[in-house]
Every structure is written in C-alpha cells, then in structure tokens.
Amino acid sequence: MKKAVMPFAIVVLLALVPYVAVEFAGLGFVFGVIVPYLAIAVFLIGFTYRIIDWAKSPVPFRIPTTCGQEKSLDWIRPNRLESPSNFFEAVARVFSEVLFFRSLFRNTKAEMHDGPKLAYGSSKWLWIAGLAFHWSMLVVVLRHYRFFIEKVPGFVTLLEDFDGILDVTLPALYLTDVLLLGAVTFLVLRRFRDVKVRLISIPADYFPLFLLLGIAVVGVLMRYIVKVDVMSVKDLMINLVHFNLTLPEGIGALFYVHLFLVCVFAMYFPFSKLMHMGGVFMSPTRNLVNNSRRKRHVNPWNPDIRIRTYAEYEDEFREKMNKANLPVEKK
Amino acid sequence: MRRKMKIKEGILIAGGLLLFFFAVTYAFWQEGEAKKIPTPTAKAPDKHCVESREYMRSSHMLLLDKWRKSAVREGERIHVTPDGREFEKNLSTCFECHVSRGFCVRCHSYASAKPNCFECHHEM
C-alpha cells in the first residue's frame, strides 16, 4: 500500500505548493512565468536526449516480435502487418500500434478455476481504457491550444464542437473530460484490484496516474465549478509564447495549481515511463523489418577473427600425422 | 557500446523529433504580438453590476444559468443582491448597461467560448 500512498501524498503536496505560494506569498511570477519556461526547456531537452540515446544504442540483430507468417515462398500467404517484409509494412505496423494499440488488443488474462484448472481468456478492458485515455488526452491537449493562440485555429473549434456535442451543463460538458477521468480512474483501480498487477506495480507506476488525475480534476473544477478568469489566463499564455514576461492580475490560485502540476508532468516526462511516447517508435521489436531469411544481418562489432581451416591445420601437421598413421586428406 | 547511426535511420528519427517539436511549440511560431485582451466597457461604468466585477468576469455564466432555471422553471423573476438592490432576471436587464451582443462577443471569441444564449434570444 505504501507504494501507492507515497506518490499520492507527493501529488497532493505538489498541488499545495503553488496554492500556498501564490495565495499567501505572492509568488505568482515564479509559478506563472519562470516555472513554465523551465518546464518546457527541461521537457524538450530531456526528450531529445532520451531519443538520441536510444538512437545510438546498438541493434545488432533482427528482433521483431512477430506473430504472423513471414514472407516466404510465393504460395505461402505472408501476414504483412504482423510480420512486415518491407519498410512500408513496418511503418504500418508501428502506426497500428501507436494509433490502435494492437498488441494490447491481444491482452489475455489467466485465471485459476476449481479443479484446479488454469484458464486463459481474452481481456479487452485494459485496451479499451488505454485507448479511451490516450485519445481523450490528445483531444484535451489539442483543445488547450485555444489558450495559446490568439486567433483560435479551426481544428480547435471543431474539436470543441464535437467534444461538447451533448450540450449539457453550462460550460458544455466535454466528452473527453468524462472519458479521461473515467479511464485514468480505471487504470488506477486496475493496479489495486488484481493481486498480480498490484505486486508488480511500483511508485513510478502510480505517480503519473495520480499526477494526471490531479491535473484533470483541477482542470475540470476550473471549467465547471470554481471559475477562474479565463481572459487573464489566456493573456498570460499569449504573453508567455511571445516572450513578454508580465503576469496579469487576478487569476485564481486554482489555475496555478493546474499549471504547476502540468509543469511537473512535463519535467518528469523525459525521465520516466512516460517516454513510451517516443519509445514506441524506437522499439526494435516493433519497428524492424522481419527479413532475416532473405538478408544476412551481421553483428557490426563482431571482432575480425582469423579462422584456421582444416586444410591449414593439415598442412602444418601432415608429416606428423603421416608418421602416426593418421588419415590425411591430401597426401 | 555506441554505434554510428545509419543515415536513413538518422533522417527518420530527426524528422520525427522535429515534427514533434513543431507540434509542441506550435503556439510559439504563431504570428502576432502579445496584445492586450479585449476590455469592452459598459454604458454606465459608475453603476454597479449584479455582482462584483471579478465575479462577473469569471462566473457570469453560472449566474445566468441560475437565473434561467429559477425564472423559467420556478417563476422567481426578481433577483435580490446581498446589498438589497433588485433586478429583473432577464437578458434585457444586462443589455441596459452592456449595450449589445458585441459586448459579449469580443471576449467570447477571444477565449473561443460559445455562449448559447442567442440561440433562443435572437432579438438581443
């Protein structure tokens, strides 16, 4: 339980820091201007560092984890997506993973039944919750462009229209808000519920979940219940992206909590499991072409070993072998 | 163990990174300077609004929503402020000082928030 309580306490503490600092110490400039710049710098530099680090890591062998027929003889039908044989099939495979989580779709669950019998069954909940969470997150992030760009781009208003299509509650309820909160809650409960998943879950699994939950809850609060002055918020953001370092008056303290948690998220990102965002593209078990039967792949750092053939051996020892009546190939 | 990147791989990875950076910093590349936010003014600036300016700025939609429910569904058409002033719960009450729809639109379009008042109140 400690594994989950500690990250939770840290997130609560992180949420309190800007609240206290802005409300009682007047440190709005620090949390509204300095920390966001710091966060985006750490995010971009850290992200690049990790990607370059992975790019430099050796991939000596073909190690795609395939689950389909490799391209072989003409009359054997290859599985082009599961066992890609050229660059474009590999790209399609990576993107099917990125966009639709194909490998999670195959998730199975093992259960012990009376007997004793071990049964495996398909388990799609993680796949569904994962999809709901990631896609909602994408829409939510894109929707936030309305605060950063003076003339809001068309795709953002389009997203807002579709997202608020239910048109219930006064600032129209966004579907993605509901989906995101629901999915993250499920992902937390999933780790608590199953004893096997609970056992392998570490604080680094809970922390991003609680952090996201915190960001989303504060965001939803600001939109629907405890209002902040949206105009000043946008003023601050427009100022930030144009490097005009001023802090508008009168933004609610709740906003700084939201912003600070997002900054923590951005700074934590490159050094955590969240890097699966970039990693999914760099994973050799997913992005390699499965062509090891058609093409010889040699480990690039194999040492240049001098090979001694049998013929050379015999040349050296022929006389002695003849004396000892050992059979030789060349007389 | 480090290795030299293959050129094709390098181009792909660098291209992907650049694309990602562009998406993240999209707002930074937008044209224009940091402008002042629109500050439309009411006709009678010395008169007090229903609530404080800060409250109205952030939460006027909640008040209007409350007005709609209590006026239309419960028939309570008079709003009494804490300091005893009375207002008729009616959009025309707002428009007495905040002359036209233009007052709303300037901020609403800036913040990309669509008021749905005028879907029914065409005449305003």
Image (cartoon, coloured by chain):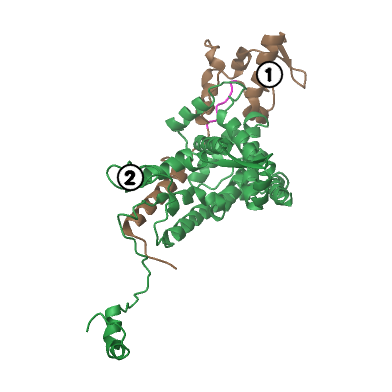
On the rendered structure, is A111 left or right of A324?
right
**Identity of the residue drawn at 53% across and 31% down:** B111
Q: Which residue is mark 2?
A: A88
Q: Secondary structure at mark 2?
A: helix
**Residue A251 can be seen, yes or no:** no
Would residue A271 be counted in the magenta stretch? no
Which mark is drawn over residue A219? Answer: none
Three-letter amino acid code at disc 2? Phe
**Identity of the residue drawn at 46% across and 56% down:** A51
**Identity of the residue drawn at 69% across and 24% down:** B51
Question: How far is the residue under mark 2 from the one under mark 1?
Answer: 57 Å
Q: Colour of chain B?
A: brown
Q: Chain of mark 2?
A: A
Question: Does residue B10 lie above or below A228 as drawn?
Answer: below
Residue span colored magenta: B38-43
Mark 2 residue crowding within 10 angstroms, few (<14) / some (14–19) / many (20+): few
Would residue B42 be counted in the magenta stretch? yes
Q: Colour of chain A?
A: green
**Which one is in front, A312 or A295?**
A312
* Image quadrant in which the C terminus of chain A is located: bottom left
Which mark is drawn over residue B66? Answer: 1
**Residue A242 can be seen, yes or no:** yes
On the rendered structure, is A75 left or right of A192?
left
Three-letter amino acid code at disc 1? Lys
